[in-house]
Amino acid sequence: MAADGWSWFPVLAAGVSLFKCLFISSYRSTDFEVHRNWLAITHSLPVSRWYHENSSEWTLDYPPLFAWFEFGLSHVARHFDGDMLLLHKQNYASPATVLFQRLSVIVTDGVFILAARECCRCVQTQKASQKAVLSQPSFILAVLLLLNFGLFIVDHIHFQYNGFLFGFLLLSVAKHLQAQHLQGALLFAILLNLKHIYLYVAPAYGVYLLRSYCFTESSTDGGIRWRSFSLLRLLALGSVVMAVCGLSFGPFIVMGQLPQVLSRLFPFKRGLCHAYWAPNAWALYNALDKVLATLGVRLKLLKEAELPQASMTGGLVQEFQHSVLPSVSPSVTLVCTLLSILPALASIWRRPRGARGFLRCLLLCALGSFMFGWHVHEKAILIAILPLSILAVESREDAGIFLLLSTTGHYSLFPLLFTPTELPIKVCLMLMFSLFSFCALRKLHSGDGSLLHPLEVVYLLGLGMVALFSEVLFPLSPWKQRLPFLPLLATSMYCSVGVSYSFLRLYATLLRSDSKPKRH
């Protein structure tokens, strides 16, 4: 960036990157071995075997473009330690292997840094004489993105490549904010072919691009001018998407392996919930089923021997039955998800409000899919938290929603780091990020009162009580042996309430904006 007010950005980005290097030797999850195995698969086997290899339980289950990404990394990896690329070297983690994989995450975060820069350019910035750099919306947004607590622990401690992926999402959003819609569509198509979880927000892209890009004009009341439909724009849009999908899936279609690839990408037999219930509607549903089953047994309305014995939280490749409430199938979750996002899609179709209206719709699609999707991972909450950062620096009400959702969503990630060594790290990092978020956004949106309602403040204080119980008191209690799942259950249930409330509050802002006259 130029030195005219932006000289701080490369300094901040470099500082954040160096800070990440401090955690190279920290705890790492099984995802570290997952990606090492994918390096070995793509390097050692022909393309035709990539989605058939199953000698390890960590089979390749990302879209082909990510497989090619791993293939590219493998050619660099061999210069660090060639043994990491051998399929039979399971759970291999030599110092050189750890160094390479950690550095690969840090280096590929360059995409995320570029995306953060572009997003910062899209927010209104006052002149330096009017506002100090540290209080500028662009600076606050840069910190909220580059130092995001959830993304940091998931990528640089737990181990994944989410920063690289979120870089494409935020770059795509930035391009739409800059009215460069074809570039935005291209970047999102690339993202979908890197990781298919971003299908969560694909409906927002589809409706927005059709309504606001393919239709070039609206009537005075915001309705569609059907004669303004541009077939040329639709063909251009379709060509961009098909070209990316063709390059990604083309080789596997030619080899007749598309069904095999899709079976890896959409393994519906994994069960409704992950091993740790993501804080969503199904976590509340599961908990209610457990409570009803327990009451039924105690009131002698149900026989314990006749209840399903399998746990719904095992994360194994099988389906489970609820005890009292109707069991939920993938088709039911699909219907619930579609119903939850339909009002948001209808809103940007009936009353387009530009790229920021699209961004709000994207957030609601992300949260709707998180709330009602099948086998949702807790890390998926970041798909909503990170883009919401953009709106948080522009709107006082959105800032309040961001504080509630980010605090709740970030705490729900605590179980990812379960070793005692990481306890002070995750507590300190989250406290620092939360403190900056609350102070910076409150100062930015200076005005009377807090950004949060009193009951919201009480809820967040309760989150501290849950943390104290789960992280400090429970490990010292006699319940540790008899009820080892209790901290996870408490975390999931409590965070589910906060995420659900944030979802509803975000919808309320959309409905209020729909009731106002359309801006021109």
Image (cartoon, rainbow, N blue to C red):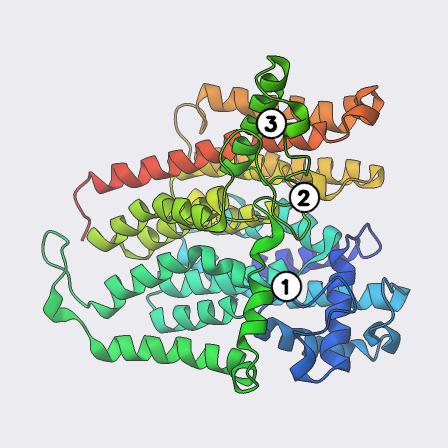
Q: Residues within 10 Å of mark 3 (few under 14, many from 20)?
A: some
- Mark pair 1, 2: CA separation: 28 Å
Considering every residue shown, the one lying at the far bottom of the view is 254
Q: Which mark is residue 109?
A: 1
Q: Secondary structure at mark 2?
A: loop
Residue sitting at x 44%, y 29%: 451
- Between 409 and 262, which is closer to the camera in this rendering? 262
Residue sitting at x 16%, y 43%: 517
Total labels: the figure holds: 3
Q: Quadrant of residue 422?
A: top right
Disc number lying in front (3 or 2): 3
Q: Secondary structure at mark 1?
A: loop
Q: Quadrant of residue 514?
A: top left
Q: Percent position (x, y) of residue 501?
A: 45, 31
Q: Secondary structure at mark 3?
A: helix
Sequence-earlier tag: 3 or 2? 2
Q: Is residue 129 visible?
A: no
- Mark pair 3, 2: CA separation: 16 Å
At label 1, which amino acid type do we have?
Answer: Asp
At label 2, which amino acid type do we have?
Answer: Ala
At label 3, which amino acid type do we have?
Answer: Lys
Disc number lying in front (3 or 1): 3
Residue indicated by mark 2: 275
Residue indicated by mark 3: 290
- Looking at the image, is 83 positioned above or below residue 217? below
Q: Percent position (x, y) of residue 375?
A: 57, 48
Q: Is residue 222 left or right of residue 253?
A: left
Sequence-earlier tag: 1 or 2? 1
